[in-house]
Image (cartoon, helix red, strand yellow):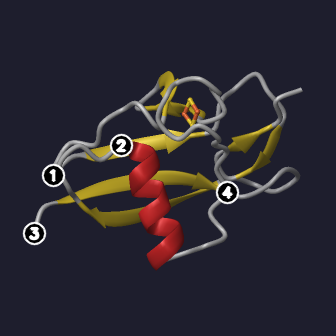
């Protein structure tokens, strides 16, 4: 079975961030947000991420830094066999894990 490895920043405001690694089963067309949903469902429901529209690039709540570049988790496709670094946006107050303040 193909997988995607995600290395995700974990922690919350006031704490030292850490990096957690997850291996997610790959399926055709899955987005990085889909991979994060899989982690929340199967490994750790406490993994925080913002989202609303889930696929339309409309809400922009799922913005994050992916391999060093800003993008929307719901529109970036996962690649089978790849390893991806996912971090919260910079320049916004950090709340928890991948969630930053929208204010
Ligand atoms: S969840 Fe709305 S743009 Fe990604």
Q: Earlier in the sequence, mark 2 or mark 3?
A: 3
Residue 34 as seen in the image, left or right of residue 71: left
Q: Which residue is mark 2?
A: 31
Q: Quadrant of ligand 1?
A: top right
* Res 48 label: 4
Label 4: element kind:
loop
- Badge nearest the viewer, 2 or 4: 2
Q: In the depicted view, which residue is nearer to us: 58 or 11? A: 58
Mark whose residue sits in front, 1 or 3: 3
The residues bearing labels 2 and 1 have C-alpha atoms spaced at a distance of 14 Å
Give 62 or 52, whichever is nearer the viewer.
52
Q: Single out the residue that lies furthest toward the left.
A: 1
Q: Is residue 35 left or right of residue 47?
A: left
Q: How many marks?
A: 4
Q: Position of residue 40 (x, y in %)?
A: 53, 68
Q: CA distance from mark 3 to mark 4?
A: 27 Å
Front in this rendered view, residue 7 or 47: 47
Which mark is first along the chain, 3 or 1?
3
SS at mark 1 in the image: loop
**Which image quadrant: the C terminus?**
top right
């Amino acid at each position: 079975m193909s997988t995607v490895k995600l290395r995700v920043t974990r922690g919350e405001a006031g704490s030292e961030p850490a990096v957690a690694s997850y291996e997610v089963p790959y399926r055709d067309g899955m987005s990085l947000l889909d991979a994060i949903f899989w982690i929340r469902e199967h490994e750790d429901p406490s993994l925080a991420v913002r989202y609303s529209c889930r696929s339309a690039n409309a809400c922009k709540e799922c913005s994050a830094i992916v391999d060093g570049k800003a993008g929307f988790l719901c529109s970036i496709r996962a690649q089978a066999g790849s390893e991806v670094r996912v971090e919260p946006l910079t320049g916004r107050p950090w709340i928890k894990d991948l969630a930053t303040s929208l204010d």
